Amino acid sequence: YGTQTIDGQGHLTIGGVDSVDLAKQYGTPLFVYDIQLFRDRAWAFQQTFEDAGIGYQVAYASKAFSSIAIYQVASQENLSLDVVSGGELYTAIKAGFPKEKIHFHGNNKSLDELRMAFDEQIGCIVVDNFHEIAQLKLLSEQLAKPMNILLRVTPGIEAHTHDYITTGQEDSKFGFDLNNGQADLAFKETYQHEYLAVLGLHCHIGSQIFDTAAFRMAAEKLVAKMAGWQEEFGYRCTVLNLGGGFGIRYTEEDQPLEPAEYVKEMIGTVKEVSVNSGFTVPEIWIEPGRSLVGDAGTTLYTVGSMKEVPNVRKYIAVDGGMSDNIRPALYGAAYSSAIANKAGHALTETYTVAGKCCESGDKLIERAELPQAESGDILAVFCTGAYGYSMASNYNRLARPAVVFAENGEHQLAVRRETHEDIVRLDLDYGIKAGHE
Ligand code: LLP
């Protein structure tokens, strides 16, 4: 998983750094990102477009992991950025991310959020619904400021891992339906507007997708729609954004393609359909989140208590859990792990890895094949880089972990660990302080 290796002491290394040393220095639970891996992934996506000689933007879908430091790495790698809230946009501005490469998503952007996008003159807003169109018209006219927009559509294709389903009409909270006239209406309402510039269409058909068929089908449908509009209205859309969703390998059961393979298939389809319908090949934009940061991230925990339920299972409990990784509890997501200080030892035991939250369902891994564990061991859970920290909470008033970036044998704190003081920073007294008298 990622680029971990084992060093001379039998310790797992991440980004060339001894993970056991990291755990000692920064404490646990700790997110460690192998930043070179993120850079390699970013490069692979972009290189595929370069090789195909096609216009593109690769936007990092930062809901997967948002922080100033990762935005700065994304910027160094020439990525664009997908943000979905005022909070992510604010973080991007704070990070000094190039505003013209920021794309703003969301199905219910507030007026304040939209105003922020205009004030900062970001690259584009991905428009989700008719309410938003009305607000954008109003705002742009009031402010007399232009804005690029993409229209988000639901093409009636939903993909999950190996399966996809196609429907005439999609029951989704996102976007304009492509098949029932909504998308056409949204286009008619915007393409001639004085301040709004319709760049093209956007769709996102799912997450953790392994198969390329659904992407090809979506590309086909969206290009056909844009070609149709050109014929009917004489207006040429120049951008096709096909979203993210490229799958990664959490466990050995997952067999995704190389990330760039998905892109190759998309490019092939877009070129073919464009040429066949006499449409100029559009720029292709994508929005990978998980496939950029997922396997770059590892969580280090310290093993504390252990418990055996005779004839049933052995538990090992770690110092984090659903508060730093909600995915197993929420989606039944599976992860792989290793004992970082016993890398290379024989895997003689099967443990259930429990978190420390007060819920029976707070289990990170149902069946982890590991060496004999003992209290004090450092457990590494792999591929936690996407939707781990970003979905973390203070449930049970646990402090959010620190995040460290490791690269070329160096390491640096990217997000500091929360303290108890941080935990109460928003709380206000109500009456007298607790105590006697
Ligand atoms: N673009 C749009 C419009 C999206 O909604 C998403 C993810 C992405 C791009 C990035 O998708 P990715 O490449 O990361 O699959 N919390 C869930 C995943 C939710 C994904 C939401 N949208 C999880 O932990 O699996």
Image: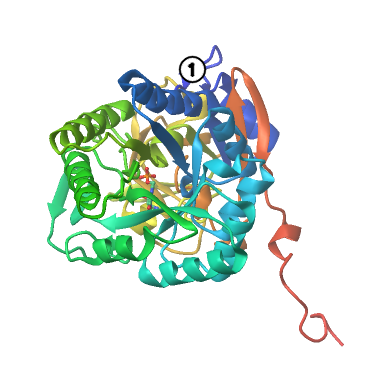
Give the SS element for disc 1: strand
Residue at 56 percent across and 18 percent down: it is 16
Relative placement, left or right, of 414 versus 161 is right
Residue at 60 percent across and 39 percent down: it is 98
Residue at 19 percent across and 50 percent down: it is 228
Q: Is residue 297 visible?
A: yes
Residue type, mark 1 in image: Ile
**Quarter of the rendering occupied by the C terminus:** bottom right
Question: Does residue 338 lie above or below 346 as drawn?
Answer: below
Question: Does residue 33 lie above or below 48 as drawn?
Answer: below
Question: In terms of depth relative to the viewer, which is nearer, 15 or 320?
Answer: 15
- Crowding around mark 1 (Cα neighbors within 10 Å: few <14, some 14 to 19, many 20+) is some
**Quarter of the rendering occupied by the N terminus:** top left
Q: Residue furthest right?
A: 437
Question: Does residue 228 lie above or below 194 as drawn?
Answer: above
Q: How many marks?
A: 1
Relative placement, left or right, of 192 versus 81 is left
In the rendering, at what x and y percent does residue 334 appear?
33, 44
Question: In terms of depth relative to the viewer, which is nearer, 225 or 173?
Answer: 225
Question: Does residue 328 lie above or below 425 as drawn?
Answer: above
Q: Mark 1 points at which residue?
A: 6
Residue 219 picture quarter: top left
In the rendering, at what x and y percent does residue 88 appear?
57, 53
Note whether ligand 1 is within 8 Å of mark 1. no
Relative placement, left or right, of 170 versus 9 is left
Q: Is residue 250 visible?
A: no
